[in-house]
Every structure is written in structure tokens, then in C-alpha cells.
Amino acid sequence: MTRYFEKNCVISGAGMSKMYRKPEVYPFNLAVDACRNAIADAGLEIGDIDGIACWPHAAVHVGHGSSAASPVDIKNSLGLKLNWFEAGMGPGQFASIANAIGAIAAGYCNHVLCYRAEGERWVPMYGKAYADGNLPTPEGFNQWTTPYFAPSAATWIALHADLHMRQTGLKREQLAMIAINQRKNAALNPNAVYREPITLDEYFDARMITTPFCIYDCDVPIDGAAAVVISRADAIPASSRPTVRFEAVGTALHDHFSWFQRSDFPNMAMSDAAKMLWSRTDLTPADLTSAHLYDGFSWLTVLWLEALGITKPGATGDFLEGGQRIALDGVLPLNTNGGQLSEGRLHAFNHLVEAVRQLRGEAGDRQVADAKVAVCSAGGGVFGSALLIVRD
């Protein structure tokens, strides 16, 4: 089999900041904290970092706090001497990871700092603007949404989810197991913003946002940051702990770049990324010991389960039924940190940090037994990227 470049790269360090539901600490400071923590966790010095990447660039923001730190500001704050840096959109929130692997393969750098920084509680301008009636100009993609007062992905994804559930028979009580199980996991995670348990009755009594989503199906805006250091495998310091290596990466987009006009609607870009992921490895979904799947909305996790071949459309509801199969001691522990629904929204970078901790055996009370192979995914709609990482 072809030896792909990602197999020569490792996640040498992983770190997070504290997560805040209320504005307490300036978000840029949290980004610096996460980056410093990841570098220290890698056993590296600031001077060892010769590359940096993030998603998206702070300059790309749309008037809210979804980009709390730009690469150049992190570079200046930490005093990095860089051979390579970038920031952009790409195939989902793990685009920076894929770009870092490419830069290392090209010989540009040895250790790339990749991070995601959010400040949506500090600067909640996005929601306020819409609440005040300042909707996007109805042009480009917005021509399909603004005339219907639908500026939010909560509405777009709900349309996908509603059709999918009608087609496959997935029930809300089965979908609820994702939120309920992740809250159980969050209770074991001191960094999670929501740790109180949810019952099925509470789920059904919760405020509806966009059918079929209630508030518990929606991720939690926070101020916080997560970071990882991607390194060339032969450039990391000697360590007694397990090495976490990339086995495969999926970044493909083969169908239409559109939320609504894919030929396989209501599927999304994740379908293409998942196929690419499995094409680059001899491993299969049966080898997974944990899954850390994007949960901007709970149903996106369902679609990732199906795109990755972990379940088949029409069978996902049975897989989720009762929550036992996705529990920490289940056949495939899912979003063991509590995910974005309970720990907080970091566009799956917190999932990646958690996966690294699981593979190293550092997850404490939520540790999965004999964790060896983990899949991480990010994105919905036109964005989709996936990582398969293994313990060497």
C-alpha cells in the first residue's frame, strides 16, 4: 500500500485553556494559554516551533468572536521564529491540521502549532446583529436564506435533519441519546461548561430551536481555545508515554460546494472526506476504539457516523437506542469529553485534544479501556475533514 505522508507525522503536544460560558478572561489570553500548554505538553521549547496554522484567520470573522486570535498575533505574542504559517477556510475546521502535515512533508518545518480560539461570549455581536434585524445581504449563498429569514446554520441543518429522519426513521428519542450521553461524559470532565445530567424527559421538555432540534441539540458558545503541535515523527523528544501518530486524513470535496444543492442531499461534504479517509489506510471502522465526531448539532454526529461507515442509514437509530453502545464502556465510546454540546464549542479541536489524551491513557475518570485507534471529525454543510489517529 502507498505510504502516505501523514503517517510520518505525530501529535506531539495537546493543550487547552479553561472554558468560560460567561465573559471573564480576554479570549486572546485563552488562546495564548492553550498554545503554551500544547508546546509544553510536547516537551518542546518556544524556539522549536517553526510553523503555525489556524482556522479561520481572525481577519475573516463576520463581526463576532469566532476568531479570537490570528496566527500573526500568536506569533508575536510567543516570539515564534517561523519558517511557514497560514490561515484560511479549507475543507473544514481541521484544514489547519492537513496543511501542517503538508508543510512538514514538504520540509518547510518540523513542529507546527495548530489552534482554534473562540471568544463568542466576550464578543456576541453575531446573534445581536440578527436579533436587531440586520440580516445578510441576499446575494450569493444568502440569496437562498435571507429572504426566508434564515441566516443561521441551525435552520439550514434542521432542514437536512428533518428530511434525513423522515427517510431513515431516526427518532428524536434516539437522537437525544447523543446529548444525554455526552452530558454524562462531561460530568467527568472538570473543564466542561455544563456537567449536570440530562434526562430524556428534560430533553423533550426543552425549548425548541428549529425542528427537530431543541436547545440540548445545539453546541454551546464559549470563550476558550485548544491547540495541538504537529511534528515530524523523527523530530520529537524521547518520551516514555505513547506516541500518537496520524494514520489517515480525509479532506475531499467531490460534490457541489453548497449547503442545499448536493446531488446526494441531505448528505454533506463529510461524505466525501470520510471516503478519502478510509482510502488511505488498511484499518476499518471495526478497528475504532473511540469516536470524537463533530457535534455542532447532534444530528451532524449522526451523519458523521453514517459517512464514516460506523453505522448505515436506517440503522443509526438502533445503534443509539438507550445510549449503551456509545457510552464510555460501550462498543464505541462517543465524544468522551462531553463534546461541543457540553464541554463547549471549539469546532472539534477539543475533540482532537481528547482523542490524544484517550490514546495516551491520560483521560482520567473517562478513560476508555485499551484505547488504540480514534477517529476525529470536523464540519457540517460545505465543510468536512476527518483524522484517523493511532497509538504507536
Image (cartoon, grey):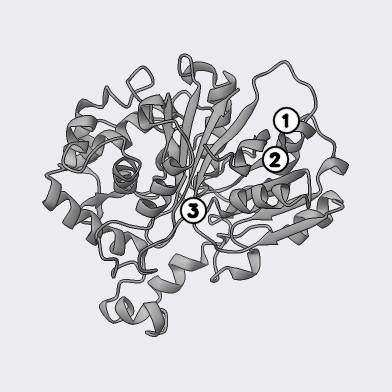
Of the residues under marks 1 and 2, which one precedes in the sequence? 1
Question: Which quadrant of the structure image shows residue 305?
Answer: top left
Packing grade of label 3 (10 A; few <14, some 14-19, many >=20) is many
Q: Is residue 28 visible?
A: no
Check if mark 1's residue and mark 2's residue have beta carbons within 8 Å. yes
Label for residue 41? 1
Viewer-nearest of labels 1 and 2? 2
Q: Estimate the x, y position of residue 96 in percent, counting from the top left.
A: 61, 53
Instruction: Answer with left or right where residue 288 lies relative to residue 94.
Output: left
Front residue (pair 81, 135):
81
Q: CA distance from mark 1 to mark 2?
A: 9 Å
Residue on which disc 2 sits:
229
SS class, disc 3? loop
Viewer-nearest of labels 2 and 3? 3
Q: Estimate the x, y position of residue 33 in percent, counting from the top left.
A: 72, 42
SS class, disc 1? helix
Label for residue 218? none
Instruction: Answer with left or right where residue 2 lies relative to residue 29.
Output: left
Of the residues under marks 2 and 3, which one precedes in the sequence? 2
Label for residue 251? 3
Looking at the picture, does residue 273 appear above or below residue 170? below
Instruction: Answer with left or right where residue 380 lies relative to residue 359.
Output: left
Packing grade of label 2 (10 A; few <14, some 14-19, many >=20) is many
Q: CA distance from mark 1 to mark 3?
A: 27 Å
Q: Estimate the x, y position of residue 46 in percent, counting from the top left.
A: 84, 41
